[in-house]
Image: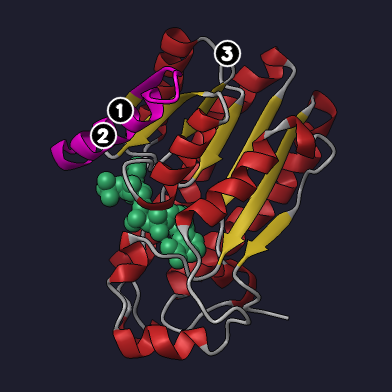
């Protein structure tokens, strides 16, 4: 059975991707932040995944820490046997205009959204090299493509995710490992639920489809990118934004 490892899968888009890949027939490794609250949420996600008749195992690790990623990847290999697909999804926001943003707020977002990708790739790519097969999907954002006021930290981290995606695609293409990114726009999740109502209404004016996306609409594109149907697609960024930018 093929195995998919999804980071930050205790809620939101990550949880939805885990469930979709379980439905597709993957055994799933559900990464969650090492806290009791995240562990409890991840366990619920695992139960929903198991309902599709696959194995679902939770792994606690703060993906911004290299040592924790190393331990997690070892544990996934030991318990599930391989890592065929990696979805780098974990992410945070600490939104403020540049003038008001602290150095800590900048560094925190870079550590979780950007450095985590390096940590995961360093540990998972050697596993995929040995397998002579692998699918990597990084969750970027439209902010990484176009920038966004109040998100200099987040935009920088997601822009880096896109350039890292292309670099890995170039370095590992000959090893039968593909690496792509998706760039969601406004998706209904706990991350966007906290935004002010007037901001949300204003942002929708720029969306051709005039609605928010659902996590399932991100998960379905990820499902394609980890499947054999996308076997000749690598180094690409697929925007999932209802036509935010055209
Ligand atoms: P979310 O609901 O806040 O979920 C983020 C997940 O990441 C949570 O499960 C969280 O765990 C986990 N996480 C945070 N820090 C972590 C760490 N250090 N180690 C391990 N896990 C960690 O957000 P979301 O909207 O689903 O976002 C998922 C991804 O999509 C992110 O990369 C985000 O930037 C991207 N994205 C979202 C949107 C959107 O509109 N929602 C748009 C573009 C891109 P706990 O909460 O359990 O701590």
The disc placed on residue 47 is 1
- Local crowd at mark 3 within 10 Å, few (<14), some, or many (≥20)? few
- Local crowd at mark 2 within 10 Å, few (<14), some, or many (≥20)? few
Q: CA distance from mark 3 to mark 1?
A: 18 Å
For the record, the magenta segment spans: 34-57
Of labels 3 and 1, earlier in sequence is: 3
Q: Is residue 236 left or right of residue 70?
A: right
**Image quadrant for the C terminus?**
bottom right
Q: Tell which of 79 and 68 is nearer to you.
A: 79
Residue 41: x percent and y percent?
23, 39
Residue 60 appears in the rendering:
no
Q: What SS does tag 3 mark?
A: loop
- Whether the residues at callouts 3 and 1 have beta carbons within 8 Å, the answer is no
Disc 2, ligand 1: is the CB inside 8 Å?
A: no
Residue 20 appears in the rendering:
yes
Q: What SS does tag 2 mark?
A: helix
State which quadrant residue 161 falls in.
bottom right
Q: CA distance from mark 1 to mark 2?
A: 5 Å
* 210, above or below 13, in the image: below
Could you tell me which residue is drawn at 44 percent across and 36 percent down?
Answer: 19
The residue that disc 3 covers is: 1
State which quadrant residue 196 falls in.
bottom left
Of labels 2 and 3, earlier in sequence is: 3
Mark 3 or 1: in front is 1
Could you tell me which residue is drawn at 36 percent across and 21 percent down?
Answer: 57
Residue 139 within the magenta-colored segment of the rendering:
no
Identity of the residue furthest to the left in this view = 36
The residue that disc 2 covers is: 44
Q: Is residue 220 left or right of residue 196?
A: right
Is the stretch drawn in magenta largely helix, strand or loop? Answer: helix
């Amino acid at each position: 059975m093929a195995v998919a490892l999804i980071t930050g899968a205790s809620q939101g888009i990550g949880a939805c991707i885990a469930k979709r890949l379980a439905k597709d027939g993957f055994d799933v490794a559900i990464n969650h932040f090492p806290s009791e609250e995240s562990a409890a949420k991840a366990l619920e996600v695992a139960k929903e995944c198991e309902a599709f008749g696959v194995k679902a195992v939770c792994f606690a690790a703060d993906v911004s820490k290299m040592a924790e990623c190393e331990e997690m990847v070892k544990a996934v290999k030991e318990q599930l046997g391989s890592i065929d697909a990696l979805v780098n999804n974990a992410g945070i926001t600490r939104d403020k205009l540049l003038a008001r943003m602290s150095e800590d707020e900048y560094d925190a977002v870079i550590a979780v959204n950007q450095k985590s990708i390096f940590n995961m790739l360093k540990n998972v790519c050697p596993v995929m090299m040995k397998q002579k097969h692998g699918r990597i999907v990084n969750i970027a954002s439209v902010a990484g493509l176009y920038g966004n006021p109040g998100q200099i930290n987040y935009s920088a981290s997601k822009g880096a995710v896109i350039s890292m995606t292309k670099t890995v695609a170039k370095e590992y293409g000959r090893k039968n490992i593909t690496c792509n990114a998706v760039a969601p726009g406004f998706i209904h999740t706990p991350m966007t639920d906290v935004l002010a109502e007037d901001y949300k209404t204003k942002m929708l004016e720029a969306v051709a489809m005039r609605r928010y996306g659902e996590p399932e609409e991100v998960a379905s594109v990820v499902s394609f990118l980890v499947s054999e149907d996308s076997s000749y697609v690598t180094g690409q960024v697929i925007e999932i934004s209802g036509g935010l930018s055209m």
